[in-house]
Image (tube, coloured by chain):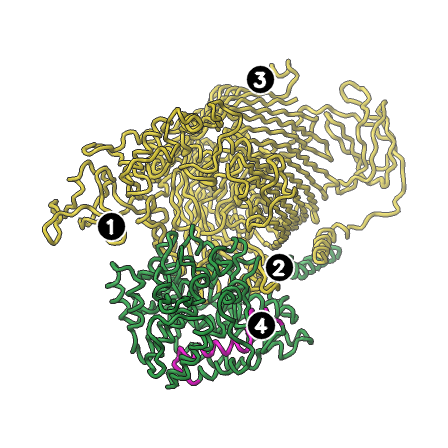
Chain colours: A yellow, B green
């Protein structure tokens, strides 16, 4: 606590020492000034106009307001000061007092409400630290205006950005409301971190991580919908910083890129009220066709027979008995249930936002309040969010401005008890036996209102299998989040236009409550087990204080050819997390859902946990930019970082960055090319360090054994001290070019980059046991993350009535390991096991390659299973007998049978084993990107479209593997109806064998080229013209309709080709387990302004 | 001038804040203990000693509890057990003498974990003397001696199981202590252990003044028993007998009376007057044996021939003699349950409840000391004296004479007989394989037949010829180094038989 006070003090000292030395004028004479304020045009008195005495710096000394007759009286302190008069709707007026005591004023009506705070004549790119004109920027950044994406059905901006920016890859974890998105800027530069970029809102970092040890009960990372909950309606624009020179200024947390979000601000003018409304409906397309109950009940006994050689005893396995004389089993197990349909519904969404902006000379405001309500396509999922934001700017004087904002968000999310990672409800619905009933029938054959959740049947027990409808409806998982972000900023011009200081402080209070309950009916298990009536309650409270103090110096240089500006910035961040969690089970009733109710706590997983952790970081940055003659622009920065997650040896790091821009079009010899507005080349190099994910790892921690010895508790060293953990450093190099032609109608950005990560972190590297430990977090190697991007913006047609625009971006990214610790595993995937592919760690080769067998179809008959050599003749044994093809001799030595899958015997030894494994594909896209033509007619009707694509990559169709394996009692796809059944059948679908055979080894049977082009969205927006608006007494009115995910062009046979490799390790590859294509959304929206 | 003041004040403000902020990022965990704060008081030293014992009851890193390894290493390859239907393929490999480097049960991590806790205490406890004035040198010596004894016990298990292993005698405190180290030969490790133990002997108390603590924690007699065992392995018979005599001469231990008492006192109740050192499982930490031996989930059962061929059936007397160590003690013959760990009475009709499965794991007891002495002095030519010791053990157990009588005149006859008696006395106590190996390797594998004879019983007939061929290579008597260890320590060389 003491340290904390000290830090507040040190900040305040830094913050307020400067203004406080401004001596106040004291003891000035008090003189009274009177006058009358009238409208210049109508000569009417103006009531309520503000009249203020203002000093040379524009600071208000005294103020009053005119009365009903327009008269005012003001006691001023100095006759040298100015008198300011302002009233909304009139031009403000300033006048020297000059010793006069009566000043009458005529106010002129303002022509427009112009005077937007942001001057948009030339776009600024901002690395968040120093505003630079976009045309002079030396860094690689891309920007998107919120207007472009407001039509999309998106709860948060990350969803809306998907596919819009080159080099930014955003993928959804799941389609459920509130599911978090994975944001990757230029791929992954780490093999163990989450890889999410730093989010910066209005110049201050915005915390999006929660401590990794939270949520022991249902560990998953996707339930944090409220992490990125800046309402899309409040956003003005978003900039993505991509190269290391740009991110370096943000320090350790920006190693994965930076997303800068600017929110809307108030502007001078009459108050204007905006209302935006959006509603949408989402439909899930049909999934791949699955077997119905009857087909399923035919397949399973056949598969059993193929395995054991004996028929399935349906007297014992009554699930397949179908005997009407056994009414309980007959009624419950003779259905044709479509489990997918039972848990699906049409999703819908409504989003309302009301915002007000306005302001006068001194104060401007933007306030908004929003309500968002989404119902997911899976039963039991929804999200409600209320949010409000107030941005307030106040000009104290020409030299001092303050800017404050407060944002509050309340989210209430219901999700399914089990998340996608641990076998979500939808996953179970796909494999659930279709002959089972949703509701239980009694002995008499009457359906009861109770879900049919047997403790176990032939398909297994919870948690592998359960009644998904009961799980969706009865099991609860609620996430309640509240977040308040107050913010205070002050700008002070120490020397006007030359030296400016800015002080920022932001508090972030982010509280989340997770509450879940798993009732007996959802699992069907007996009440002695802990998965019955399991109640969980977990709170996590985060408190973050971030400060930033900066000093910007822009000297006035006489020679206009030279320009220089620089900043000195000091930042601190202090994040404290407190969490408490409690899990119990076997409450007395399914209605008693709280863990505080007397219930069972003995088992290991039923526990109470509480922890406190704290992370602090500080950074100091010096950055300068020099421009010569608008042609040569040079920028350099040096950042020092300190982080509490390191031991004393490596607490601080220094990270330099340099960047350069050469404007070729500014050279004399280029002047003859009149069409070129700008042609520049950029080069940059920057380093940025990343801190580890866990707190306190540089301590040798001790823990207590969960049991005692002779009644006394024992203590042991639970982790070793990590003295050698160093900053993971990204050395980013970027070469780029910007071209702008035909007055901005053709613009192009080209970038090439390589981010080399040295001292790669790896958490949990295996170490030899003689140390007494099994793993350690270490810096293990060097990895490159490299690629290129091209983005093009064109306006091919621009006439009075028509504007046609066409934007296009394309990029490629790949990862290569350059150097790695010998203890890092060098392969993953055991090809002798079913369904697995081999991946190898190959130094200097891009990630994503995988290896497996070649599939050659199905052995139709006994004769075809005879092993043949390279010459095509049968291989003969020592006694001259022919031998059958074998699998993995001598370890397994399975002899292939007719109907089994046939794999190519690459080395012709009659034995299918690891030596027959070949290269099958690479799941790294050769190209990915998006394009979007848009047409505007008379500025009224605008039709915009957006496509995204990925080309040249292979994925493993995991869905096909799972739904055609016929390996257990899971439901399968209708493709299995063509399976091999008897000697001589010619088919491509092997026979069904429960728990046996080698029919679904990792082979090219499941590997497909997944290149695709997807028609992501189309929007038609109509903006009503001024004449109409005047009649309706509105300022703006526009309406739009939009459709998403309309169709996908691909040769891929699975459901959704847009699959990214999961994980960040060198063994990542893309598996498609989606059974349903992405949902189709239809959106209707209205924007009204008064 | 004004400007100068402004700037210098600004500069001052920045410097002050920078200086105070360097301290600001030094953070310590709010909950939990760190090394810098531990090792301050004698109570903390005591807690660390308890931690060493606790670590033997179970692992915090997901490995098996030590007694499970000791059971499988000591019994899995012998004629005492048969795999149950839930035995894993890797457990079958023990029976088949086909142990590969990827076999989970060759994982030695759990032992090294305990060794590291011992090393940590030995290295860091002495500093507590400075911090806590009430902590005496004697208390320190005792704590260090306890840790040293347990460390030696762990290395003794490792050497007997793997022969040459890495010997780490320093604590792993930071990531600077994890450099790969090569194997040290088993002989040198044992030499080191002997000298460590000798140095520690004076530090250990004869008694803690509490019966349970005397059995559950290392006393001076535990150290003597361990030394005797190591000497026996090293074929230093005189030294071994001397250590045994120290225990016998103390008169603190005696054999528990025969019949029902034997099972009840030794195994069901635990901490008997016969016990020297046993691991204290209790209701809040159960042993790993319940489901391992329970008929419905059995991984290991007793061999079917034990009653007939090991404990013997009395065909002579009218009221047949029954060996108290057989039926209802070591095993329940009706379903071949290993009764020592799961039984609740000596009639074989009542089992422990699952939450009562806390039979102790016995490292050493008095009977072991007597038989170790017998083995040692028999080797020095005192076969007659040895036979008396064996007779004491047999009489206590009401043993059946069914398999020829003891020949107290023949050294090799006695050697054989003592080995058989040990088989009966320590059935399923994790000693059989080591006993057989110790006798087989004596005098440069003069009696490799002990191992081959055992294999002819324990290995299934279709695998026997292969097993014999393997067992004739003495290197095969030691387990392979677990693949994981070879991958993570580039200085390790696989044990010769498995290359």
From the image, tell me which residue sits under label 1.
Answer: A893
Crowd band around label 1 with a 10 angstrom C-alpha radius: few (<14), some (14–19), many (20+): some
In front: mark 2 or mark 1? Answer: 1
Label 1 resides on the chain identified as: A
Same chain check for tags 3 and 4? no
In front: mark 3 or mark 4? Answer: 4
Q: Residue at x 33, y 79 (%)?
A: B413
Is residue A730 visible in the rendered image? The answer is yes
C-alpha distance separating marks 3 and 2: 67 Å
Same chain check for tags 1 and 3? yes
Q: Secondary structure at mark 3?
A: loop
Query: Disc 4 or 2, which lies upstream in sequence?
Result: 2
C-alpha distance separating marks 4 and 2: 31 Å
Q: x, y percentage for residue B456?
A: 28, 65
From the image, tell me which residue sits under label 3.
Answer: A1025
Residue positioned most to the top: A1031
């Amino acid at each position: 606590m003491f340290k904390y006070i000290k830090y507040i003090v040190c900040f305040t000292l830094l913050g307020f020492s400067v203004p406080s030395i401004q001596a106040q004028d004291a003891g000035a004479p008090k003189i009274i000034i009177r006058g009358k304020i009238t409208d210049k045009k109508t000569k009417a008195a103006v009531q309520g106009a503000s009249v203020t005495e203002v000093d040379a710096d524009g600071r208000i000394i005294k103020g009053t307001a005119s009365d009903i007759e327009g008269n005012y009286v003001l006691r001023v302190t100095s006759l040298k000061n100015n008198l300011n008069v302002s009233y909304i709707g009139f031009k403000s007026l300033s006048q020297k007092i000059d010793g006069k005591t009566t000043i009458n004023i005529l106010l002129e009506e303002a022509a427009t409400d112009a005077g937007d705070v942001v001057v948009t004549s030339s776009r600024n790119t901002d690395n968040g630290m120093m505003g630079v004109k976009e045309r002079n920027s030396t860094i690689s950044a891309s920007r998107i205006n919120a207007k472009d994406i407001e039509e999309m059905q998106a709860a948060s901006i990350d969803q809306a950005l998907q596919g819009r920016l080159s080099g930014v890859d955003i993928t959804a974890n799941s389609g459920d409301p509130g599911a978090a998105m994975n944001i990757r800027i230029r791929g992954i530069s780490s093999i163990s971190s989450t890889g999410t970029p730093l989010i910066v809102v209005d110049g201050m970092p915005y915390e999006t991580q929660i401590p990794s040890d939270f949520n022991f009960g249902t560990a998953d990372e996707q339930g944090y919908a409220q992490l990125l909950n800046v309402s899309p309606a409040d956003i003005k624009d978003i900039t993505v910083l991509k190269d290391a020179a740009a991110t370096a200024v943000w320090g350790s947390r920006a190693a994965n890129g930076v997303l800068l979000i600017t929110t809307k601000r108030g502007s001078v003018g009459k108050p204007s009220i905006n209302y935006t409304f959006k509603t949408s409906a989402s439909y899930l397309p049909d999934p791949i066709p699955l077997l119905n109950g009857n087909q399923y009940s035919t397949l399973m006994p056949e598969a059993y027979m193929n395995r054991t050689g004996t028929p399935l005893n349906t007297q014992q396995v009554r699930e397949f008995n179908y005997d009407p004389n056994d009414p309980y089993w007959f009624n419950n197990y003779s259905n044709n249930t479509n489990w997918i349909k039972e848990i699906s519904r049409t999703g819908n969404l409504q989003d309302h936002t009301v915002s007000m902006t306005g302001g006068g000379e001194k104060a401007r405001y933007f306030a908004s309040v929003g309500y968002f309500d989404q119902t997911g396509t899976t039963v039991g999922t929804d999200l409600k969010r209320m949010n409000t934001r107030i941005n307030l700017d106040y000009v104290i004087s020409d030299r001092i401005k303050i800017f404050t904002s407060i944002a509050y968000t309340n989210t209430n999310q219901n999700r399914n008890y089990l998340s996608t990672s641990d076998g979500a409800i939808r996953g179970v619905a796909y494999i659930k036996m279709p002959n089972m009933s949703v509701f239980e029938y009694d002995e008499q054959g009457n359906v009861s209102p109770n879900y049919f959740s047997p403790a176990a049947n032939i398909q297994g027990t919870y948690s592998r299998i359960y009644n998904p409808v009961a799980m969706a409806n009865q099991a609860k998982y609620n996430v309640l989040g509240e977040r308040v972000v107050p913010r205070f900023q002050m700008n002070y011009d120490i020397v006007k236009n030359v030296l400016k200081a800015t002080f920022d402080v932001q508090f972030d209070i982010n509280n989340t409550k997770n509450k879940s309950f798993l009732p007996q009916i959802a699992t069907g298990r007996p009440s002695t087990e802990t998965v019955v009536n399991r109640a969980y309650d977990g709170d996590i409270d985060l408190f973050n204080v971030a400060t930033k103090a900066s000093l910007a110096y822009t000297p006035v240089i006489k020679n206009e050819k030279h320009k220089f500006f620089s900043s000195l910035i000091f930042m601190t961040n202090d994040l404290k997390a407190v969490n408490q969690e409690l899990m119990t089970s076997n409450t007395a009733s399914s209605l008693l859902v709280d863990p505080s109710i007397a219930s069972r706590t003995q088992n290991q997983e039923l526990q109470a946990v509480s922890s406190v952790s704290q992370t602090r970081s500080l950074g100091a940055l010096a950055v300068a930019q020099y421009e010569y003659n608008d042609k040569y622009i040079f920028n350099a920065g040096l950042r020092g970082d300190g982080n509490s997650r390191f031991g004393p040896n490596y607490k601080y790091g220094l990270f330099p960055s340099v960047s350069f821009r050469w404007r070729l079009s500014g050279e004399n010899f280029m002047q003859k090319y009149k069409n070129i507005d700008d042609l520049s080349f950029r080069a940059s190099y920057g380093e940025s360090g990343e801190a580890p994910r866990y707190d306190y790892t540089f301590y040798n921690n001790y823990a207590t054994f969960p049991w005692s010895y002779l009644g006394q508790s024992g203590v042991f060293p639970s982790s070793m001290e990590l003295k050698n953990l160093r900053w993971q450093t990204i050395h980013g190099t970027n070469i780029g070019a910007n071209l702008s032609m035909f007055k901005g109608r053709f613009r192009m950005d080209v970038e090439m980059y390589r981010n080399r990560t040295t001292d790669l972190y790896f958490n949990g590297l295996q170490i030899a046991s003689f140390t007494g430990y099994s793993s350690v977090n270490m810096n293990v190697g060097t990895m490159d993350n490299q690629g290129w991007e091209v983005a093009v913006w064109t306006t091919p047609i621009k006439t009075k009535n028509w504007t046609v625009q066409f934007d296009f971006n394309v990029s490629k990214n790949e990862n290569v390991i350059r150097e790695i610790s010998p203890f890092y595993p060098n392969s993953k995937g055991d090809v002798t096991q079913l369904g697995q592919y081999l991946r190898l760690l190959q130094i200097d080769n891009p990630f994503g390659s995988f290896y497996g067998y070649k599939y050659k179809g199905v052995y139709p008959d006994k004769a075809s299973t005879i092993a043949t050599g390279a010459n095509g003749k049968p291989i003969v044994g020592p006694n001259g007998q022919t031998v059958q093809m074998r699998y993995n001799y001598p370890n397994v030595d399975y002899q292939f049978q007719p109907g089994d899958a046939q794999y190519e015997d690459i080395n012709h030894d009659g034995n299918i084993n690891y030596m027959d494994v070949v290269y099958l594909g690479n799941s790294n896209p050769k190209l990915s990107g998006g394009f979007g033509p848009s047409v505007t007619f008379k500025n009224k009707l605008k039709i915009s479209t957006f496509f995204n694509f990925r080309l040249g990559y292979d994925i493993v169709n995991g869905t096909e593997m799972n739904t055609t394996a016929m390996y257990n009692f899971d439901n399968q796809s209708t493709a299995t109806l063509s399976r091999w059944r008897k000697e001589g059948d010619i088919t491509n679908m092997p026979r069904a064998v429960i728990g046996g055979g080698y029919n679904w080894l990792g082979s090219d049977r499941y590997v497909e080229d997944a290149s695709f082009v997807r028609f992501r969205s189309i929007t038609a927006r109509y903006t009503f013209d001024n004449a109409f608006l005047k009649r309706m007494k509105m300022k703006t009115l526009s309406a739009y309709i939009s459709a998403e995910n309309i169709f996908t062009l691909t040769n891929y046979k699975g459901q959704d080709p847009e699959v990214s490799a999961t994980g960040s390790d060198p063994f990542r590859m893309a598996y498609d387990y989606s059974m349903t294509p992405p949902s189709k959304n239809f959106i209707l929206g209205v924007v009204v302004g008064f | 001038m004004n400007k100068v003041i402004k700037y210098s004040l600004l500069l001052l403000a920045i410097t002050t804040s920078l200086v105070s902020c360097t301290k600001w990022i030094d953070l310590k965990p709010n909950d939990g203990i760190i090394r810098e704060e531990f090792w301050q008081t004698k109570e903390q030293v005591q807690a660390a000693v308890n931690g060493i014992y606790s670590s033997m009851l179970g692992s915090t890193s997901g490995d098996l509890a030590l007694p499970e390894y000791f059971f499988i290493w000591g019994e899995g390859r012998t004629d005492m057990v048969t795999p149950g239907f839930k035995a894993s393929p890797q457990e079958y490999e023990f029976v088949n003498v086909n142990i590969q480097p990827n076999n989970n049960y060759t994982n030695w991590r759990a032992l090294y974990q305990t060794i590291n806790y011992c090393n940590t205490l030995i290295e860091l406890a002495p500093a507590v003397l400075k911090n806590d004035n009430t902590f005496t040198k004697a208390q320190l010596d005792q704590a260090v001696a306890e840790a040293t004894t347990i460390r030696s016990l762990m290395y003794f298990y490792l050497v007997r199981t793997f022969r040459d292993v890495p010997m780490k005698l320093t604590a792993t405190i930071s990531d600077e202590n994890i450099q790969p180290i090569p194997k040290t030969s088993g002989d040198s490790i044992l030499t080191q252990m002997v000298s460590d133990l000798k140095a520690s002997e004076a530090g250990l108390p004869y008694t803690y003044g509490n019966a349970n603590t005397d059995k559950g924690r290392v006393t001076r007699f535990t150290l003597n028993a361990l030394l005797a065992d190591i000497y026996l392995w090293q074929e230093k018979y005189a030294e071994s007998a001397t250590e045994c005599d120290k225990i016998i001469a103390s008169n603190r231990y005696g054999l528990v009376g025969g019949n029902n008492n034997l099972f009840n006192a030794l195994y069901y109740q635990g901490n008997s007057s016969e016990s020297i050192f046993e691991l204290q499982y209790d209701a809040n930490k159960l042993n790993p044996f319940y489901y391992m031996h329970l008929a419905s989930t059995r991984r290991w059962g007793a061999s079917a021939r034990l009653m007939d061929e090991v404990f013997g059936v009395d065909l002579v007397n009218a009221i047949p003699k029954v060996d108290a160590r057989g039926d209802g003690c070591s095993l329940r013959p009706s379903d071949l349950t290993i009764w020592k760990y799961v039984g609740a009475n000596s009639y074989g009709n009542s089992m422990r409840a699952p939450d009562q499965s806390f039979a102790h794991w016995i490292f050493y007891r008095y009977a072991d000391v007597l038989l170790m002495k017998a083995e040692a002095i028999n080797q020095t030519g005192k076969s007659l004296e040895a036979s008396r010791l064996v007779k004491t053990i047999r009489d206590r157990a009401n043993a059946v004479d069914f398999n020829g009588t003891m020949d107290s005149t023949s050294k090799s006859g006695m050697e054989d007989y003592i080995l058989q008696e040990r088989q009966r006395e320590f059935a399923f106590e994790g000693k059989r394989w080591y006993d057989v190996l110790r006798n087989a390797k004596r005098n440069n594998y003069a009696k490799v037949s002990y191992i081959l004879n055992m294999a002819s019983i324990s290995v299934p007939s279709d695998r026997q010829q292969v097993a014999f061929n393997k067992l004739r290579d003495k290197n095969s008597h030691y387990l392979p180094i677990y693949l994981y260890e070879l991958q993570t320590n580039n200085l390790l060389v696989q044990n010769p038989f498995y290359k």
